[in-house]
Amino acid sequence: MTDGAEVLNVFMRCRPGLERFARTAFPRLAHDVDDLLQEIWLELQTKVVSSDFQAPRNCESWLRMLVRSRAIDRLRSMERQVFLSLTNTRGDASKSRERVELEDNGPSPATHAVEQERRRRQGLLLSDVLVEFCRWCEERPQRLAIKEAYERSLHGQSPAQIAAAMGVPPASVHQWLHQAREWVRQRVAERDVERSVFLTLYAGQ
Amino acid sequence: MGEKSAMQRSESKTPELKTLGDVVRWVVAELGAMCPSPERLAAYFANPDDANLRDVRYHVEEVRCPICRTEREAIQRAISD
């Protein structure tokens, strides 16, 4: 049996486990898992016949990585679709907002939709930048501490708490966080040239 | 028609994003934005005490990333089967 045929066999054998993995790790894709795995199956059929294909050493683990990667791609794609659908209706939303706000002093549904749209754009942009940031950190061992410190800060830890948890001087943490934030800020600025998405990035809003 | 339904379904399940904090939680916990590379995650599962993988340990054990922990459960299940 060829390596490619063996990979396809492993996929079929492990399919129930891959389904379970996708449903557990990505609950929002629970209704789409069959489609997701079908797409991966088709991708594999093309992949395994290409001349440069090399069967992975641990096929099952490799397949899970593929499922994970395609699931995240699909989630991001879903968000982009939703974002585009909101963008297309934004003109109508703006018109109705003026009308509705005359009758109600609270945030109107249209205002809420526009704000949700902005938050989605923030999320998609930030997601891409953070993934890129992680890969940048992983390129050099000395940058791994920057990644850990920054992730801790994203989860609400103060520099003092980070320093204590990582067993390093607070000055190092301040330096790492400054480096990380500056890296992220620059990438966001490059992509958000009109500053329409992240006007409030460092205002904490 | 089917595509529209799928879109509406996914939209209805998108979390409410009221603050930048909500956005950060969403991209980190659900979109896997801070997850380590698959190679480093696998290396961590193989050798959890590796000092070069302490950022992965924090992500998996303290943040309790659901995506990475499900990956570990799948590996453990595969080993025990």
Image (cartoon, coloured by chain):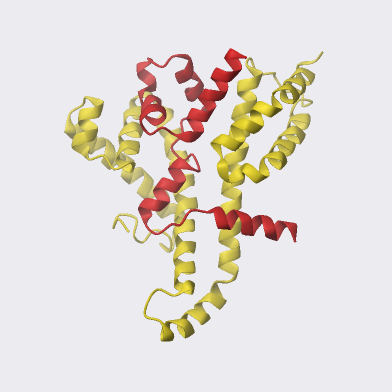
Chain colours: A yellow, B red
Whole-percent x and y of residue A142? Answer: 33, 25
Q: Residue furthest right?
A: A1
**Residue A59 drawn at (x, y percent):** 66, 19
Residue A27's place in the image compared with B13, above or below, is above
**Which of the 4 quarters of the picture holds residue A193?**
bottom left
- Residue A164 drawn above or below residue A198: above
Q: Residue at x 37, y 57 (%)?
A: B19
Q: State the image coordinates of residue A181 (x, y, percent, origin top left).
A: 32, 44
Side of B5 relative to A168 (left or right)? right
Q: Is residue A147 above or below residue B26?
A: above
Q: Quadrant of the N terminus of chain B?
A: bottom right
Q: Which sits in the foreground, A175 or A81?
A: A81
Residue drawn 50% across the image and 51% down it: A124
Q: Quadrant of the C terminus of chain B?
A: top right
Q: Residue A33 appears in which quarter of the rendering?
A: top right
* Count of numbered circles in the view: 0
Residue in front for this viewpoint, A105 or A194: A105
- Side (left or right) of A65 relative to B51: right
Give the x, y percent position of residue A28. Answer: 57, 46
- For this view, does A203 lie left or right of residue A103? left
A59 left or right of B77 in image: right
